[in-house]
Amino acid sequence: MSPGKSPQHPRCCRTGHAANVTMTTKLFATILRWTARILGTVLVGLTLLIAIGEGMPNPFTQPFVIGIGFLALALVLLGILLAWRWEFLGGIMSLVGWVLFFLAERVSLRQSVFIALLGIPSLLFLGSWFLRCHYAKHNSADEGAQSPTPSIKPPTGLEAHQP
């Protein structure tokens, strides 16, 4: 084995290169998370502004498809807000709501920029969650390679994905 390689890691995880990869991963995850938070907040605010300005119709008196659209939009907005604390749960909820909204309304994404934008925060939150999990896993593996008994276990469950 060559001196710069760790026996437990793939080629991308050489000792000198691993620190740069993990810091870049952490930085990129942070950028994705804050971009999702800012864009999501703007979209939630714009949706509320439109609902207040136009007047919100009673969703229970609307046709079934419109009611599904309201439910889906509520899932998207609630998911965006939940993702501030729980990226994975909020990202999945928002993405499911966006797909449901898209299917219920049958709108072309080229015709509605707003509907297309509603899906972006969920993808950014999920990307941030994935990168942070990768960073935590990679970081704990590096610590385990340096000492025979790792002092920190890889995070599991939802606590691994909190900001």
Image: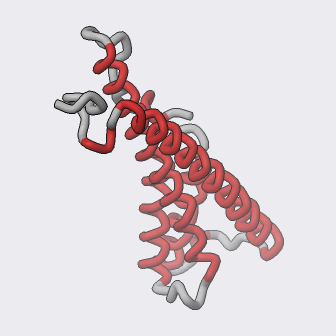
Which one is in front, 136 or 21?
21
Q: Would residue 152 be seen by someone viewing this image from the given angle?
A: yes
The residue that appears at 60% across and 58% down in the rendered structure is 77
Q: Quadrant of residue 103?
A: bottom left
The residue that appears at 60% across and 43% down in the rendered structure is 84
Residue 85 against residue 46 in the figure, above or below: above
Residue 111 against residue 15 in the figure, above or below: below
> Which quadrant, please, contains the C terminus?
top right
Which one is in front, 138 or 109?
138
The residue that appears at 36% across and 20% down in the rendered structure is 143
Which one is in front, 117 or 101?
117
Q: How many marks?
A: 0
Which one is in front, 140 or 11?
11
Q: Position of residue 39 (x, y in %)?
A: 67, 60
Q: Would residue 137 be seen by someone viewing this image from the given angle?
A: no
Q: Position of residue 2 (x, y in %)?
A: 21, 32
The residue that appears at 62% across and 81% down in the rendered structure is 113
* Left or right of residue 156: residue 129: right
Q: Position of residue 134 (x, y in %)?
A: 38, 40
Q: Position of residue 69 (x, y in %)?
A: 52, 73
Residue 121 against residue 1 in the figure, above or below: below
Residue 49 against residue 1 in the figure, above or below: below
Q: Quadrant of residue 110?
A: bottom right
